[in-house]
Amino acid sequence: MLKKKIGIIGCGNMGEAILRGLHHKGMTKNIVVSETRPERRDFIKKTYGVEVEQDNKKLASQVQVIILAVKPQELRGVLQEISPALDSATLLISVAAGASLGTIASILDKGARLVRAMPNIAALALESATALAKGGEATKEDMEVAQEIFDALGKTVVIPEQLMDAVTGMSGSGPAYVCLFIEALADGGVRMGLPRKAALDMAIQTVLGTARLLTEQGEHPAHLKDKVSSPGGTTIAGIAALEAKGFRGAVMEAVASATQRSKELAKMQG
Ligand SMILES: NC(=O)c1ccc[n+]([C@@H]2O[C@H](COP(=O)([O-])OP(=O)(O)OC[C@H]3O[C@@H](n4cnc5c(N)ncnc54)[C@H](OP(=O)(O)O)[C@@H]3O)[C@@H](O)[C@H]2O)c1
């Protein structure tokens, strides 16, 4: 796979994360990257040994897959710029938050093979939770290509596009919720007398270790929770305190609010 030539337009946080993931998997042979700033182009070329380009249209005319990783407000301009260079075989993958497949297709003003991807910030550590949605003209092979690219950055799921707002509200915003939890866990430790640094290190490791355990053992979180909650013990006392404050309901509300906000922002953007 990835015998296709891939172009990444915009190599900031997300563009570089994608590049790093492909680099990590030894898949950088056929990649060309475009960026506005010369010093950024030099850095990318030096760090990853890929071709760099400053002309998006030129890039678009020489690749079979284009990953659009510019900010949503820059997307329209870039799409208009590359549109004449696209042919019916070009696969376009957009990671722009809030930009629907319909919006992208309407800007291109011609049929195109589109895939929408929603990774999260953990892509920077190659641990993204990424959702992919297939556009009408994308083929099964296009989806396999997109999946292979984003599997290099973590875990990938394929969903219908109408669930992208829910993805944005859950795994897109999720790292911030987890940060709040980690911070609160550490503060709890400090409150009980632990030194600040030790508390934070232990809180981060507790979340990381639990996530890894669930992943590696394929266990449901409710089962793991039951396993560590002995009758009359400390953990069930802590859980009762969390439940009294509506912990799970609050997290579910957070996802619902963020999903609603994502819908509102997408409407404004569209
Ligand atoms: N960061 C995340 O966690 C995350 C998560 C999910 C989705 N996304 C999506 O990923 C996209 C990129 O986000 P980001 O955080 O990576 O933003 P970013 O760090 O600002 O990266 C965008 C890059 O594109 C460059 N650029 C701007 N206009 C360009 C053009 N016409 N041609 C080529 N390159 C151009 C920018 O250069 P300058 O700095 O010189 O303008 C910048 O280096 C966004 O659409 C965002 O919604 C990001």
Image (cartoon, rainbow, N blue to C red):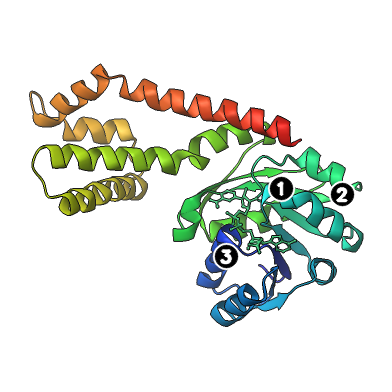
Q: Viewed as shown, does residue 226 lie left or right of 19?
A: left
Give me the residue at 23% from left, 39% from top: 185
Mark 2 burial class by Cα count in 10 Å: few <14, some 14-19, many 20+: some
What residue lies at 36% left-to-right and 47% top-to-bottom? 215
Label 2 belongs to which residue? Answer: 108
Which residue is labeled 3 in the image? 16
Does any atom of ligand 1 lie closer than 8 Å to the CB of label 3?
A: yes
- Graded by Cα atoms within 10 Å as few (under 14), some (14 to 19) or many (20 or more), the crowding at tag 1 reads few
Residue 204 higher or lower than 262, as above or below: below
Q: Where is mark 1, residue-wise?
A: 73
In contact (CB < 8 Å): disc 1 and disc 3: no
Q: Which three-letter amino acid code belongs to the residue tagged 1?
A: Gln
Mark 1 or 3, closer to the camera: 1
In the image, what residue occupies the spot 55% across and 59% down? 13
Q: Position of residue 262 (x, y in %)?
A: 61, 32
In the displayed structure, would residue 43 be above or below residue 245? below
Between the residue at mark 2 and the residue at mark 3, the CA separation in whole angstroms equals 25 Å
Judged left or right of residue 172, residue 148 is right
Report the image quarter containing ligand 1: bottom right
